[in-house]
Image (tube, rainbow, N blue to C red):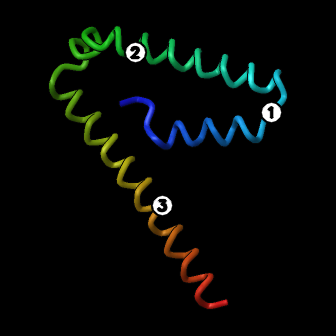
């Protein structure tokens, strides 16, 4: 669930753009750091739930939903502007 098609295609693009060994080493180390941070957050999830309680989790869910909707609207408006820009050239 954490590594979707967007993440995988992004990594493939990074691999093609940065073919020097040192660059690839930095990419792999970055991935490992993110994996460790994700592990820590998921491991501490029960404590976070106790601390936030139901109302806090509900508020965070709404905020994250709003952010996801904003990102989706940005993608849609960017695509529409690109299509309209190409159509009027």
Q: CA distance from mark 2 to mark 1?
A: 32 Å
Looking at the rendered image, the quarter that the C terminus falls into is bottom right
Give the answer, above or below, for where 3 lies relative to 81.
above
- Do tag 2 and tag 3 residues touch (Cβ < 8 Å)? no
Callout in the foreground (2, 1): 1
Which residue carries the number 1 mark? Answer: 19
Element carrying mark 2 = helix
Query: Residue 60 in the image: x percent, y percent?
Result: 29, 33
User: Closer to the N terminus: mark 1 or mark 3?
Assistant: 1
Give the answer, above or below, for where 85 lies relative to 26.
below
Q: Nearer the viewer, residue 25 or 52?
A: 25
Which residue carries the number 3 mark? Answer: 75
Q: CA distance from mark 2 to mark 3?
A: 28 Å
The residue lying at 55 percent from left, 83 percent from top is: 84
Q: Quadrant of residue 88?
A: bottom right
Q: Is residue 59 left or right of residue 3?
A: left
Q: Quadrant of residue 2?
A: top left
Q: Nearer the viewer, residue 52 or 71?
A: 71
Which residue carries the number 2 mark? Answer: 41
């Amino acid at each position: 669930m954490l590594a979707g098609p967007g993440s995988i295609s992004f990594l493939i693009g990074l691999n093609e753009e940065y073919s020097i060994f040192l660059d690839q080493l930095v990419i792999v180390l970055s991935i490992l750091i993110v994996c460790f941070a994700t592990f820590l957050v998921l491991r501490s999830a029960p404590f976070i739930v106790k601390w936030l309680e139901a109302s806090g989790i509900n508020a965070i869910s709404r905020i994250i939903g709003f952010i996801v909707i904003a990102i989706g609207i940005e993608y849609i408006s960017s695509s529409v502007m690109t299509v309209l820009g190409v159509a009027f050239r």
